[in-house]
Image (cartoon, rainbow, N blue to C red):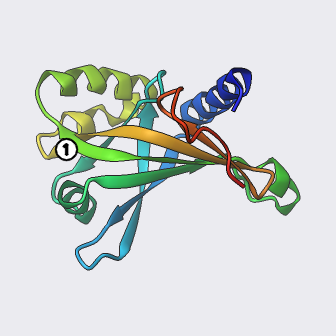
């Protein structure tokens, strides 16, 4: 993918990740079956990190700590069939981990800038701040046009794949 196209794709990803309030997180269950959960999330400007909060007593938390490879799906769809070709979907793939200590405080501020109404949930001792180190974004537009945006700009997998 040309540098200009990579920058443009990066801009699309940044804008969509910033605008959308919810995404669907996919983890892997104990039996290997996929498990999905709706989450509120925030994405770092450099696109290398996605942060969300979850209670530690959930299947989601148990699954992602046991098998940290996760995917987050975010899109801009509305419930209008005539807009199918304008829908953009993004899958952010990466590795999740529970943030502890000073990193938690730094990401707390970032998260609460987007979701100030979630302060009590964020400050609960039962809540875990999860950091996803994103390795790549798969971006789908025009229903079937797939592009890959690796987090590292010199990654050989950058470009259109379908």
The x, y position of residue 81, in whole percent, is 83, 62
Left or right side of 61 for 144? right
Q: How many marks?
A: 1
> Which residue is painted at 22% across and 61% down in the image?
58
* Occupied quadrant, residue 61: bottom left
Disc 1 element: strand
Q: Is residue 60 above or below residue 31?
A: above
> Which residue is painted at 41% across and 50% down in the image?
39
* Occupied quadrant, residue 149: top right
Left or right side of 11 for 68? left
The x, y position of residue 114, in whole percent, is 45, 28
> Which residue is painted at 53% across and 26% down in the image?
153
The x, y position of residue 45, in whole percent, is 48, 21
The x, y position of residue 53, in whole percent, is 29, 42
Residue at the bottom extreme of this rendering: 31
Left or right side of 4 for 20? left
> Which residue is painted at 56% across and 42% down in the image?
157
Quadrant of the snapshot with the N terminus: top right
Residue at the front extreme of this rendering: 156
The residue beneath circle 1 is: 127
Q: Is residue 158 above or below residue 74?
A: above
Tell me if mark 1 has few (under 14), some (14-19) or many (20+) residues whose alpha carbon lies within 10 angstroms of its own.
Answer: some
User: Looking at the image, which is closer to me, 149 or 21?
Assistant: 149
Left or right side of 125 for 31? right
Quadrant of the snapshot with the C terminus: bottom right
Residue at the right extreme of this rendering: 82
């Amino acid at each position: 993918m040309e540098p200009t196209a990579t920058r443009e794709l990066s801009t699309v990803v940044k804008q969509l990740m910033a605008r959308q309030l919810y995404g669907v997180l996919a983890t892997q269950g104990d039996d290997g079956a996929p498990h999905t959960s709706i989450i509120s999330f925030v994405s770092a400007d450099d696109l290398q990190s996605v942060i969300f909060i979850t209670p530690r007593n959930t299947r989601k938390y148990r699954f992602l700590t046991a098998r940290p490879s996760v995917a987050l799906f975010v899109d801009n769809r509305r419930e209008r069939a005539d807009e199918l070709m304008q829908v953009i979907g993004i899958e952010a793939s990466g590795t999740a981990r529970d943030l502890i200590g000073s990193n938690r405080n730094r990401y707390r501020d970032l998260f609460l800038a987007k979701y100030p109404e979630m302060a009590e949930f964020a400050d609960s001792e039962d809540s875990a701040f999860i950091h996803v180190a994103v390795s790549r974004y798969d971006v789908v537009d025009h229903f079937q046009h797939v592009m890959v945006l690796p987090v590292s700009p010199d990654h050989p997998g950058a470009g259109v794949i379908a």
